[in-house]
Amino acid sequence: MTDELAERIAVATPAETAYAAVADLRRMTRWSPECFAIWVTARDDDRPSRFVGWNRRGPFLWFTTARVVVAEPGREFAFDVSAFGQPVARWGYRFTPAREGCEVTEYWHDRRNRAAMVLGRIFTGKVASARPAANRDGMRQTLARLKNDLERH
């Protein structure tokens, strides 16, 4: 099984602007093909530090809890996701300045244990081995929508 996946896209906006968009967690619901709602449950220094993400794929609906673990403006934003106390993944975004804006890299690091894999099958309808392919497809969609959103404004 793949432990980490990453997808990249060039965006014609400064790294700081792309970071600010991603760190504004509620905007993720515009870009992600799975996440349709985010409820911020805790803040540190007026920034979200914990949240609940509501997800949907076909007829399946589930939620996860997340904790922001990296918040370096203009460089990286990442959060650890869990479900019912079981580790699921680390999702993150890295921002690299480029000649005409920046490169945004979205990454997913699989942290699932056996219990999380069983929960994933029940709630998402995906066997553990299918999750990386579904996530890679989702990353591509998310990054394309992020690019479109940022370059349109």
Image (cartoon, rainbow, N blue to C red):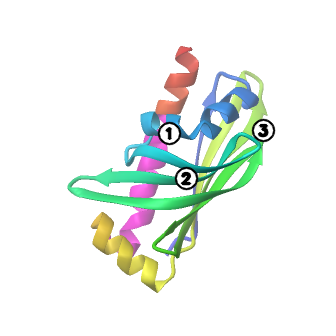
Question: Can you give x and y, in whole percent of width and height, for residue 16 in the image?
Answer: 75, 30
Write the residue at 36% across / 80% down.
118
Viewer-nearest of labels 2 and 3? 2
Distance (Cα) linking label 2 and label 3: 19 Å
Q: Disc 2 residue type?
A: Phe
**Circle 1: residue type:** Met
Q: Is residue 86 above or below residue 81?
A: below
Where is mark 1, residue-wise? 28
Of pointers 3 and 1, the one earlier in the residue sequence:
1
Residue 37 on image: x %, y %: 41, 44
Q: Which residue is mark 3?
A: 73
Q: Secondary structure at mark 2?
A: strand
- N-term mark: 2 or 3: 2
Report the predominant secondary structure element of the magenta stretch: helix
Magenta stretch containing residue 137, yes or no? yes
Residue position for label 2:
51
Q: The magenta stretch spans which residues? A: 126-144
Which one is in front, 93 or 37? Answer: 37
